[in-house]
Structures are given as C-alpha cells and as structure tokens.
Image: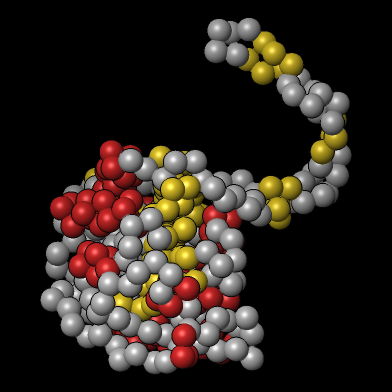
Amino acid sequence: MNTSSTQASGTVPSVGSDALLGAPWLLLGDCLERMKEIPDGSVDLTVTSPPYDNLRTYNGTLNDWTPEKWQAIIRELFRVTKQGGVVVWIVGDATIKGSETGTSFRQALYAMECGFNLHDTMIWEKQTFSAVGALRSRYAPVFDYMFILSKGAPKTFNPIIDRITGKRRVKTGSVRQADGTMKPMSRQGATYGGGAPAQRFNVWKCNTEMSNAVRTLHPAVFPEALARDHIISWSNPGDTVFDPFLGSGTTGKMAILHGRKFIGIERDETYFTIAKKRIEDALAYCPNAEVSHGDRQRQIDTHSTHKNGSPN
C-alpha cells in the first residue's frame, strides 16, 4: 500500500512541485494570506462552504468576516482557478430582524463581476431544519445554495446517473420559441424511463452529518456525500481540489479517497489538527495515494495573524 504524508509549507511552491503533485498540502493560517502561496491557474476544482454570515463563531475566531474579506477571497479564487475550472460555493444566509441578509446572492453576483460564470445555481435540500422560531412566520428553511462558478466553460462534467425514472415513455411534443412559434422537440420518438437510471437534477437531497462521532469535531461538519458528489462531477482523478475553509477536512478526505490531489487552508489550530488527522487516515486507507518526493513530513506551519473557522 502506498501512503503519503501531509505537508505544510511556508514557501511558495512552483507548478510541478510535490505540493501540487504529491502529498496533500495543508496550510494553517488565514486563507486570504495563505492563498497567495498558491500559483496562478493551478486549481481544477474548489469545493468549499464559507461562513454563513454570523450564524456560528467557530471557537470564537470569526471576527473579521466582512464583505471586504469575502470579496478578496473570491478574487483570489479566480486567480488560482485554472481556465475551465470550477468553484462550488455552498452558502446560506442569516435572518436578522426578520429579513434574510441576501449575502449569498451578493457573493454570487460579485463572483460574476470578477470574471466567473454562474454556471448553475444548485440546491442542497436537507432532511430537517434548525432555525429557531422559523415556523411562526415562514415555511421551514431546509436548503442551502450551491453556486457553481466556472472560469470559462467547465472543462469537466461527469454527471451522476442515479435518478429513478418512471414508466417507459416515448418522446413527443413541441417547444415554444422566443418568437412564440412552436418547434418539434429534438429526438422525437426516442424512448426514456422504464426504471432505467437517469441524470440527476440540480436539487440534491443530502442529509446533514448525523454521526455524533463526526459532529463533535466541528460545529458544521460538511456531509461527505455532498463533497464526494461535487468532486466526482466537476473533476477527474489526478486533478487538484482546493478548500480554503478546511474545517474538519471533509473535502480533503473525499478528494484523497477519489484519487485527487488536495490543497486545504484552515486558520483555527484545533480544526486544522482534526482535518490533518482525517486526511492522513484517508491516505492510509487509499491504496492509490501518491507518495511525495522522499515521503517526508514537513513541520506544520503555525504562523498566522488571524483565525477563521469554516463550516466544513
């Protein structure tokens, strides 16, 4: 079994170094500062969930989450993303004085100003809700947004085929055009359904993390299935996956288990240690994990001026 040790580095790697081609590269510190060490156009896919306004404090470290901060992070994400690369930005809004903040929409629109395409607005539908008092004045909130941001047209799309179809049907009918005229649908007479699996829609039902052993690691542990399915959909084995809000390390764990390289940043030392352990366990489990040059363990860089927890 091949294994690889995680590494952290305070130096700027060049493209082709083992930071990008070998062992997972884990950085302790403020993501905005540490992202400067990642080369331009070196990340194929980012799967991340930034702080949801002020809904959680993350060990009391979330004291600088401002529009200026998330705007700068989005700009850095655009810089490090490859042409054709994708950022999956999973986010929700706080409700303050009876109104949702709309921060998620502002972030998506700002990403477009930076040059990203808003390739898709996906929905993560959860099995329950946790908003205290929500039912007194509104329907129970059970979803988060998953903005699929692409740098140009996505170079990779591996659709998940797991939607259960109904009885067998024959494709017929017409589609109304912009000028009001009707045009026959393409592939008239083709059959579909009949119980055969079909491509998943863009509303994904995924339970929040239910294991107490995992939930105690972090106040908002990211579901492994959600991270896994985005990694499979928007990247290929050997690609580099990034999470600037590493949290408990779920994105990193699933990237390693599915043959991707990984870069992660976390500012809270407690969460960083948890993430590092989970990723190292994934490396030990995965028989195809790459070995870094010399398979060496570098000292963890603990130099950081801020601490910023994250919801994954």
In this rendered view, identify the residue nearer to me: 268 or 212.
268
- Counting from the top left corner in percent of width and height, residue 83 is at 44, 48
- Counting from the top left corner in percent of width and height, residue 152 is at 44, 41
- Counting from the top left corner in percent of width and height, residue 160 is at 66, 54
Quadrant where the image shows the C terminus: bottom left
Q: Residue at x 29, y 88 (%)?
A: 300
In this rendered view, identify the residue nearer to me: 295 or 311.
295
Q: Is residue 56 visible?
A: no
Q: Is residue 155 left or right of residue 102?
A: right
**Tally of numbered tags:** 0
Image height of 159 relative to 279, above or below: above
Image height of 58 relative to 302, above or below: above
Quadrant where the image shows the N terminus: bottom right
In this rendered view, identify the residue nearer to me: 206 or 133.
206
Q: Is residue 72 left or right of residue 85?
A: left
- Counting from the top left corner in percent of width and height, residue 46 is at 42, 60
Q: Residue at x 77, y 46 (%)?
A: 165
Which of the 4 image quadrants contains residue 228? bottom right
Image height of 212 relative to 133, above or below: below
**What colour scheme does the image use?**
secondary structure
Q: Residue at x 19, y 75 (%)?
A: 307
Q: Residue at x 49, y 41 (%)?
A: 153
Which of the 4 image quadrants contains residue 181? top right
Q: Is residue 142 left or right of residue 182?
A: left
Q: Is residue 211 visible?
A: yes
